[in-house]
Amino acid sequence: MTVKIDTLLHESRRFAPTPEFAAQTAATPHLYTDAQKDPATFWADQARNLLHWHKPFTKTLDWTNPPFAKWFEDGELNVAFNCLDRHVLAGNGDRVALYFEGEPGDSRSYTYAELTTEVKKAANVLLGLGVTAGDRVAVYLPMIPEAVISMLAVARIGAVHSVIFGGFSAESLRSRIDDANAVLVITADGGYRKGKISALKPAVDAALQTNDSSVRNVLVVKRTGQDVQWNDRDIWWSDAMETASPEHEAKAFPAENPLFILYTSGTTGAPKGILHTSGGYLTQNAFTHQNVFDLKPETDVYWCTADVGWITGHSYVVYGPLANGATQVLYEGTPDSPHTGRWWEIIEKYKVSILYTAPTAIRTFMKLGRQIPQKFDLSSLRVLGSVGEPINPEAWMWYREVIGSNLTPIVDTWWQTETGSIMVSALAGLTETKPGAAQVPVPGITIDVLDDDGQHVGHGNGGLLVVTQPWPAMLRGIWGDPERFKETYWDKFEGTSGAKDGPLYFAGDGARLDHDGDIWLLGRVDDVMNVSGHRLSTAEIESSLVAHSLTAEAAVVGAADETTGQAVVAFVVIKFSQAEIASHEDIVGILRAHVAQQIGAIARPRDIYIVDELPKTRSGKIMRRLLRDAAEGRDVGDVTTLADTMVMNTITAQMKK
Ligand code: PRX
């Protein structure tokens, strides 16, 4: 007997955009009908409308050698010119591109004209250091304007950036530098995080210690002013910029010129260098950024809270917004420094109108309580976005009610480092939204939910999420490893009837189609449990636990069980005020019954552990793998990517109580 996933999630709430909102949106249902008629022509139109081509393309898509796609292959463009110069040439040079807010409270802003000049100077610095088109440049910086300037300068000269998140260790940095054979590293002395100075330069020094790396120079931005070790290869960014010429003409590069490599971890093995190229990537990011968020570049102030070290920072801090000429906020620090209202203070200060953030942040704010955001004027907000993991309906509703005054559309955007751009999402001005569902593919994207044999599962059923047709921002490969690229993403459905019209991209996520055909993401398939032959989603049980008034946060894992194959084990953080009222035993009983009642007896957790905190990576993802180790009584695995490496010790101690 299998429990159909459709019996496990019931969501009847619907939120249409207000009539005023719907009346002013540029997105129309024609986007969907046009795209359906002929996706390739649709994307060609977007590429022509949204970007400036130095040399127009005549070929749209070459899919003759799948899974290696070529988009707009004979066209030429300059990505940085599209993000900068053309806005200045169009008379928008005085528009603010970046409002930078440092964690200690320092701030500066750049107009499009100013940002263009900075990038031109930086491009000349790179050229002066012998960097040429196709070379790889590693960027290891805090969230400061120089990160954006560096990325665009690299793009401007046709080189390839590899941004490495500032929280990664010297070892991770070294392996990424080596894998890509980077010739230059751009870093800073340090940055500000959680009210403290966090050093960056020592990690670069350690990574390059053995002197046998491909790196010739290190450019160092002075951010904190702390003492740094100085080597022959090091150059201060400010010295180089001071003497650099502000004149630089952007040359055109082919549409398939590599733009960046970004490393992401797979289920096994070393991180994969995901390769993205220029024309298709920029097209889909400009299109989705405009239509998903209903962007009005003349009036909106947009803020995506992601770090540039992640794909969201690449696509929706740098390339999408700047290609669209948006005005945006760039914030260096963490949400709680120097106080827990910092984000809301920033929204009030800059009158942010579009906020794009992650469910984990929303749940943290929920835990702290609505009284904090309510102290600030958030009335400028008109669109809210979510990305990175399934957003449970409880958090969705809180986001809408408390942050969005019960008015703002919420767009839950599903995509991946590999997809490059948003793939599944509501469009703020058009879609009637459902709390917890990512809903529909964006126009021009074709998604399906299949069973293991490649058969469409049909409405009301769950299966595996696939992309059935090539898309402009798709990864072009794994750097240096075409075989791994094929195996990881394209082999899963090979030979099935579903793949008879061409290869299918396997995303690694479980999904469910509800009775309207809307898509619900159920988490990575490695996080989908199998209990007595029943398919259960960790996300779904977490969502149920979090929906209970006792719970602040929850993580669920499938732990090996002799009888049932896997058993549901939950780790729960209880709201402060509730912890005093009920005993742990009572709470566990209440929550087990609650899950059984909400989803079904099969989903009732075997064990619920009440803990103070969940193990999270620096980017806020819960590391369920470690919880699974703890739940299965094993030694806890590698904790180095955790934001707080001690948290697992506390959790295992609390499990014994
Ligand atoms: O499991 C999905 C989840 O994040 C994975 C991709 O992670 P990453 O490459 O780090 O990119 C994150 C930012 C785009 C996906 O395989 N994911 C991302 N967005 C959502 C999501 N899961 C559910 N709902 C989302 N909106």
Image: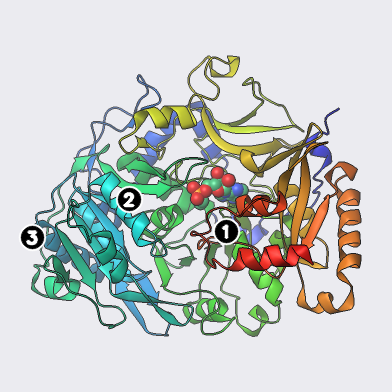
Residue 95 visible, this angle: no
Respond yes or no on whether mark 2 lies under 8 Å from ligand 1: no
Q: Nearer the viewer, residue 113 or 504?
A: 504
Placement of 515 over or under 570, stated as above or below: above
Q: Which residue is mark 1?
A: 385
Q: Please say if the residues under marks 3 and 2 sit with CB atoms less than 8 Å apart.
A: no
Placement of 2 over or under 284, stated as above or below: above
> At which x and y percent is residue 306?
47, 62
Ranked by sequence position, the earlier of labels 3 and 2 is: 3
Question: Where's the N terminus, which quadrant?
Answer: top right
Q: Which mark is residue 175?
A: 2
Q: Which mark is residue 128?
A: 3
> Callout 1 environment at 10 Å: few (<14), some (14 to 19), or many (20+)?
many
Point out the frontmost of discs 3 and 2: 2
Q: Nearer the viewer, residue 204 or 256?
A: 204
Q: Which mark is residue 656?
A: none
Q: Nearer the viewer, residue 369 or 356?
A: 369
The type of residue carrying mark 1 is Gly
Label 1 element class: strand
Placement of 39 over or under 272, stated as above or below: above
Q: Please say if the residues under marks 2 and 1 sit with CB atoms less than 8 Å apart.
A: no
> At which x and y percent is residue 261?
33, 46
> At which x and y percent is residue 517?
70, 35
Ranked by sequence position, the earlier of labels 2 and 1 is: 2
Respond yes or no on whether mark 3 lies under 8 Å from ligand 1: no
The type of residue carrying mark 3 is Gly
The type of residue carrying mark 2 is Ser
Label 3 element class: helix
Rounded to the nearest whole Å, what is the CA distance between mark 2 and mark 1?
Answer: 33 Å
